[in-house]
Image (cartoon, coloured by chain):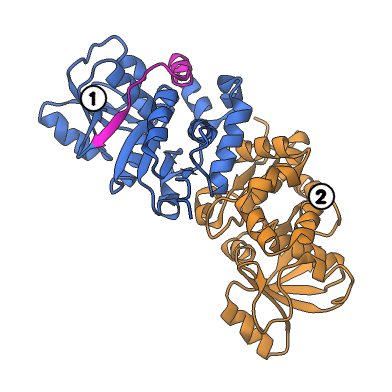
Chain colours: A blue, B orange
Amino acid sequence: MPKRKPRVEVCFTPRSYELYNEDVDIVVCIDVLRATSAMCAAFEGGVKKMIPVATLEEALEFKKQGYIVAAERKGQIVDGFTLGNSPLSYVDGKYKGETIVITTTNGTMAIHTARKAETVVIGSLLNLDALSEWLIKQNRNVLLLGSGWKETFCLEDTICAGAFVDNLLSSGKFRSDFDSSIAAKYLFRSASENIQGYLKASSHRRRLRDLNLNEDIKYCLTPNQTKVIPIKKGKYLVKM
Amino acid sequence: MPKRKPRVEVCFTPRSYELYNEDVDIVVCIDVLRATSAMCAAFEGGVKKMIPVATLEEALEFKKQGYIVAAERKGQIVDGFTLGNSPLSYVDGKYKGETIVITTTNGTMAIHTARKAETVVIGSLLNLDALSEWLIKQNRNVLLLGSGWKETFCLEDTICAGAFVDNLLSSGKFRSDFDSSIAAKYLFRSASENIQGYLKASSHRRRLRDLNLNEDIKYCLTPNQTKVIPIKKGKYLVKM
């Protein structure tokens, strides 16, 4: 009997991870607005390493040791830290060659949740096609893990996950078993012509608009601006 | 300041209920394939009361006391019980005036999860417009609670929930804050022209098709076949 195709599946939030992670080889962590977009932008901008941490306490420890620390909560830079999670902080190459510690409301939690997976990579719309190509070559089971908003479902991560599902299924080399994967693909397909318009009603979008982050949003929702694939090696994220 | 509109929201599975149930007045439990469809069909067929129970143990206790018991697991009637969760069992009026105890893989779990809510009603595509009309008249916060499949997201419950969201938002008397509600509405809108075709790829549909339940599926996916609204009163479901 021929070996079955590997699976590409979607888990909407870290809270449900244990229901979806059976036989998963590669976890793609996604937080479109804005943590994983910022990570892709950081490596594109020449950052050497990132250290994702789940809590502000850990972030403070690193700060005391002299690290540059990016810390975001509720969409804003936490008082006393250098950076938040705006991808635009990195595009001018200001942090080239540096190591950046990063903690965010939702995105670093997804990375923490996936910590026991064999391989953890960072996905966003920014590196959609480059990461899809790499995933297709691996021929392994892939789980796209959305960050959600405080554990609840969020639309932009799901649409991004659906874009990856669409790419991988279109290669003919993958299958999807879960309804979440099918729904994500459907949602991406309805959104793909105009992702920004589609997301206008989304809760997170509204939240960030209130904080005057329209430039950030536009950047994060524009696919394929980089070919970098951040990958987790021990406690570090590095460029593959 | 005028009072804000009441909310209509969607929670995909019982597992996430506590994240979505704040300030909720009415919970609509949904298990399209097939528990809540069967409940609507049962009352349409003249059943007087139903007693939903979460476990087979409880169902057995009722059986010993002489009750008619419907028990489904893995899509099939459990050995030793009279009925499963096929809505077609009820359409000929065979159980008119009877009280039926019912336990199913997913649907009765949603009802159990919502047990502390002020008001619990039973929704399906079968009573879509009748229940929507009633909900619109109540002017209270509504949560549509999908049953999912063994705690994971399922497409048919989400599409049904999205149909309710679409009806309630279209009335102009409700608002939605969560992305899950927006996504459900989007999914319903893409599916609405051809729900059966849209669900062909869904995991649950495949599962039931393998069990030769195509007639059941067709029945459950055909909207507005009844005006009954089952409502929970104490341990019973009764016709409103």
Q: Would residue A187 be seen by someone viewing this image from the given angle?
A: yes
- Up-down relation of residue A232 to residue A20 (above or below): above
Nearest the viewer among B173 and B186 is B186
For mark 1, name the chain.
A
Q: Mark 2 points at which residue?
A: B223
Which residue does the numbered mark 1 point to in the structure image?
A: A81
Frontmost residue, B217 versus B151: B217
Whether residue A235 sits left or right of residue A134 in the image: it is: left
Mark 1, secondary structure of its residue:
loop
Q: Does any portion of residue B177 appear in the rendered image? A: no
Quarter holding the C terminus of chain B is: bottom right
- Near-viewer residue (B205 or A194): B205
Q: What stretch is highlighted in magenta?
A: A211-232
Residue placed at 65% from the left, 67% from the top? B75
Quadrant position of residue A199: top right
Q: Is residue A193 magenta?
A: no
Q: Where is residue A113 in the image (x, y as percent from the top left)?
A: 33, 46
Q: How far apart are marks 1 and 2 (CA)?
A: 55 Å
- The label nearer to you, 1 versus 2, is 2
Mark 2 belongs to which subunit? Answer: B
Q: Is the residue A58 above or below the residue A223 in the image? A: below
Residue A237 x/y as whole percent: 24, 32
The image quadrant of residue B170 is top right
